[in-house]
Image (spheres, rainbow, N blue to C red):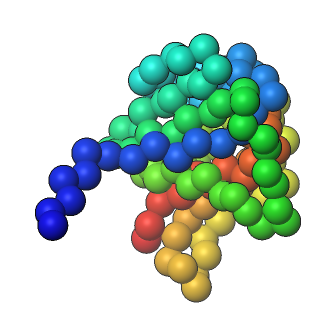
Amino acid sequence: MANNWQGSIIFFGTEDLDKTDKFYREILDLKLYKDQRLCRIYEIEGGGKIGFCSHIEIVLGEKSPIITLLTENVDDIYDTLTQKGYIIKEGPKTNEKFQIYHFFVQDPNGYTVEIQKFL
């Protein structure tokens, strides 16, 4: 049996589609792929999609989920987020164990978003 996958969408819950939209579309510059009224799906350049739905419960754990977005522009995104008033506990740093350069920020839903590049 051949699987001809055409992509993927990961869905998360939200209580405020507009705040979520502002963060992912206006701040992180993801393109809105589809607005289904109860769900908004964003396209991630390079592959994959991420969706947020108002009818899905927000589920948060101590360390999960983590939404990781890959970019070569970690520092630029950090600067943009801090200039827009987002509170980031630690600035970008190198993680030798995983050979990455990254930082974490909370989205409006409380999800951890990691901005990362591989070294």
Q: Is residue 22 left or right of residue 85?
A: left
Q: Position of residue 4 (x, y in %)?
A: 18, 53
Looking at the image, the residue that sits furthest to the front is 1
Question: On screen, 40 above or below 1?
Answer: above
Front in this rendered view, residue 36 or 70: 36
**Residue at image location 78% in from the left, 41% down from the top:** 57
Q: Residue at x 56, y 24 (%)?
A: 40
Whole-percent x, y for residue 20 in the image: 70, 27
Q: Is residue 24 left or right of residue 56?
A: left
Quadrant where the N terminus sits is: bottom left
How many numbered discs? 0
Residue for point 82% across, 62% down: 61
Quadrant into which the C terminus falls? bottom left
Residue under the point 49% across and 30% down: 42
Q: Residue furthest bottom?
A: 97
Judged from this view, the residue extending furthest toward the left is 2
Can residue 97 be seen here? The reply is yes
Residue 83 visible in image = no
Residue 43 location, quadrant: top left
Q: Is residue 53 above or below residue 21?
A: below
Vertical side of 27 occupied by 62: above or below: below
